[in-house]
Image (spheres, grey):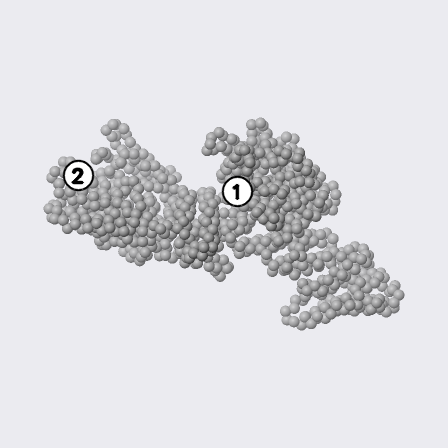
Amino acid sequence: MAMNGTPHPLLVHRLPQPNYIDFVRWVPPLSALDRLVAAAVFDSSSSTSALQILSLTQTQTQTHPADLTLQSSWPSPSRITALSLSLLRHKPLLAAATADGSIHLIAADPVDLGVDSVGSGAIHAGPVSGIDLVEGGSEIVSVGDDGRVNLVSLSESRLSHRRVFDGNGLVGFAAAKWASPAEFATGGLGFGVQCVDNRKPGGPVSQFRGNWARGTSSGIVHSIDIHPSRKHTVIAGGSSGTVFAWDLRWQQQPIILSGVATGEAQAHSPLESEVWEVRYDNYMHSLNIGNISSSRILPVMTCSEDGILAVVEQDEEPIELLAEPCAINSFDIDGQNPSDVICSLEWESIAILSRP
Amino acid sequence: MPGLGLRSLAYLSLGPAGNSLRVSVFRKPSDDGEAGGKVVEVKLGDGDGKIGDAQWRRIAYCSVTPFALLQSRKNSMLAMSRVSASSSPYGAEWWDYVKEYSREINVLLGGQKLPPSSVIEDPRIVLKKVEEPNCLKAAWELMEIFYADKQTQAWTPERLLDWLARYFLFSWQDYNSLLSGPQPTVHSKLVNFEKELAGLQTIEEDAKYWEAISSALALGWLDIAVKILHLHGSYQLDQLGSRELENGLVEAVAVLISKMPRMRPELSPGKLGECYKTKPDFIKAWETWRAQITKLDCSAFWVECDHRQTREGLKNLLQIMLGNANILCSATCHWIELHVSHLLYIRPFTMGLESMYSLAQKCMQLKPMSSPHKLMRLLIGIVGENIEVVLAECSRSFGPWMVVHAVELLTAGSTQADILLHEERFNLGGISMVELHRLVYAQFLSSHALTWQNIEICRLYELDNVRSKITKIAGVHQWKHGKKGFGVFWLQQASDEVRLNRIAQQLFDFVGKSISDESFKQWEGLIELLGSETRTAGGLEFLHKYRDFKRSLQQVHDGIATNAAKKAAESLILLMKNPSTPHRFWLPLLYDSEDFGFSLCPGYGLESSALRTILCHIGTFCKSKLKLFNWQECPLLNASQTNLLLNKLQELSMARLQPDFIEADLPPQALSSVRLALATNLGCAILEE
């Protein structure tokens, strides 16, 4: 555990906010001076939601080393349930999905940092549980509690969608992620992960069911990630601290990185409750990516309901970065500067970490 | 005295928003020509220190850490006591933990100290503002006095006094008509006296002067009493010579007042009295002090004192210190003031809650009040030693946060309270009061109702029953709203076998009705979700086998595949043999096997055997569409298998006579047509063999 052998301490700034922060993402800098953050916020006293662009300023004072300043805000018609970001022609494009089933594409202006909707549409019946914007484009894959998987695209300031799969609520999905502009994966109930090739009709090309999770009665995948250089592997995080990798080349058995399903050998797993987000940790493997064989799973960062932000690695002790008294609902690793991590805490605050 | 001769004016006005009180103190220019003054704004909230939503949430968030720490300490102490088998699970350090917890919570509740109103001590300002009123903090501190600190029970009366002075009698009573209405209090009396002070010439001749001193003394405000006493005319330089004896008596009383023994560890600066930490020391000092008062009371000097008001006034003060109940009653206004004076002068050795309730009742009879303030109601509940009343007051006036955290103080030293709060209650749906309140609080902490936070909090706070109930509710909710997959997920989280089995049965009906390719794929996902064969639920195991059976039937449907048909027939036999297959599904299963239509059965009559032809015709005639039982190439079931099915059918016919039999939703002729089809198949099979 802990940060053994690290030369400098981990710096953590906790910034109390006036709202709930449902999601938080780094926004790629529009200029060299800015450090920007996108946050999906919810004000419980007025029951209003918004997507905000905040600028992060680092000050030299000891008491107040970092500060977030509101730059612009886009009012959301309902609570934001999923947020994704891509760069389209060097401009940040955000996709926000809401509890009422609508999806909104929002562009950030590089000059005045203003945010404006460029297209929206009612896509799902009920909450959208996962969306992903394709890299460098505006196409979205969305999944919802309604059991539908949709491909959403922008045409003349409206979002239109094509239904890839309709589970009619019999099965539900919670996560979606593009592997390439034509392939994506979804995750959801029953620790299930599905890989879909857009070009091939007739449902998923491969499906994985979490029947291996014996001993646990049921489970759900909350988040998945795919590394651009390793499209054959999907990592997934879900119920009971479970984090696993599913390699399409060895489909029968998942590689379990953490969780109760791992059996007694790794019973001391730090993660016990719901894993809300998983993401490949570029910082850890940028150090030694050349040495990692393609069959080895790259390090994965996770955040969980029991307030743990950790990096898990195959056959290694997880490294705990944060242990909060409340849930960590989302996090993001800065693409430009992977030592920096931002996360949103359940108790109306944002934490910013800079790793040594 | 340094400030003598200065005159100060104090103005009270309401602040711009109407929720603050502006206290302005002006001083005349002093000798060095400097004008002085100060304006202090006292925030009143809406009169009872209301806390905003965002502040509430912040309090709720920040209190979790000390709460969790106390829980983990409690658990480890309990675990330790189990090992060491000692009689009491809580050692001395337990009280340190409780005090630490209470202190941390208290800090969270805020309440800034007001800046000192004046730098130079002014003898004519007898009252000082102490702290911004905050009802929640006041309530917490009250609980703290009586529950969190059992080691210092002897100090309870003094701590209660401080509390009353801080929150109730001193700070805000005048500003809040809720508390006392038009009824005067000692504080209001003193305020009025202070206002008139400037106009009085020889104050010791005014009855109000002596009343003010008596009242301040009765409440133990020794510094105020002495301060007013020092305004006595005999202290003035020009009169000192002529009133020497009188002044000696005044000074003697003032000294006795300032030497009053107090059963407390310390006094804040400027307060008078002598502190004693232990009861034996205090009793000794108290008796000595009382003896001195009695001695002075019996002194011959009184006869020589010719100033009547001074003589009577001072004698009255001595009676207060000697605990004269009638004089205490006339010196105080509100029942709580009388209560405090009794604790100070009549029952100075009171420990903890000892006989406080009867005293409180007596005082309330002497000084009745209308519509008591919530803090008073809480106090009455506490001194009445009625935990349920205390909890009800906490809940009614301060909300679920207060209840959950106050429970920790209530149960800290009382086994009785612990049992009362942890016992499972039928009327609360089988949960205890602690669980109920924690649950309400958990909801308060959560941003969404019925979600993960509740479940996580239940996990942390060990509310397993509640957790399973919440997940059950979530499951049923999702199921009813058409999100069947999530419904199953939550019910599995709740380990609700009963509902899962019912769902499996419903699923069977759905799946049985439509087996089109598209819909079956969806149902398949749900059946997958229902779990693997490791599950004990017979219904689910059955449903899995049923799925396999349906799948084979589907293949039969898709093309003429004898192998698939054979597989389906095998699945059917397996299902019928399996004890986990519920009775009520036997007929539907058999009927399903026939419900296939004729499109693929052109072979009737082309078979060699005339007998078979006849038998097949009987089947057709009876509108039997028994695909598996009338496979055109060869009978799929041999004679013994067919016999097994016929026996099951017979068993079913018997079972139907039972009163609790559930009839399947099938056409009335289903049983007979299945029987006939089986008979046909039996004939074919016998022929074949």
Callouts 2 and 1 close, C-beta under 8 Å = no
Residue B527 higher or lower than B134, as above or below = below
Q: CA distance from mark 2 to mark 1?
A: 67 Å
Q: Nearer the viewer, mark 2 or mark 1?
A: 1
Indicate the chain on which mark 2 is placed: B
The residue depicted at 67 percent of the width and 63 percent of the height is: B580
The residue depicted at 29 percent of the width and 57 percent of the height is: B362
Indicate the chain on which mark 1 is placed: A
Say which amino acid is labelled 1: Ala
Q: Which residue is mark 1?
A: A323
Residue B395 picture location, percent across and down: 43, 52
The residue depicted at 61 percent of the width and 45 percent of the height is: A258
Residue B60 picture location, percent across and down: 46, 46
Q: Which residue is mark 2?
A: B235
Question: Is residue A349 left or right of B561 when viewed as pictured?
Answer: left
- Label 2, secondary structure: give it: helix
Q: Residues within 10 Å of mark 1 (few under 14, many from 20)?
A: some
When asked about the image quadrant of residue B124, the answer is top left
The residue closer to the viewer here, A158 or B175, is: B175
Instruction: Evaluate whether residue A39 shows in this view.
Output: no
Q: Residues within 10 Å of mark 2 (few under 14, many from 20)?
A: some
Say which amino acid is labelled 2: Tyr
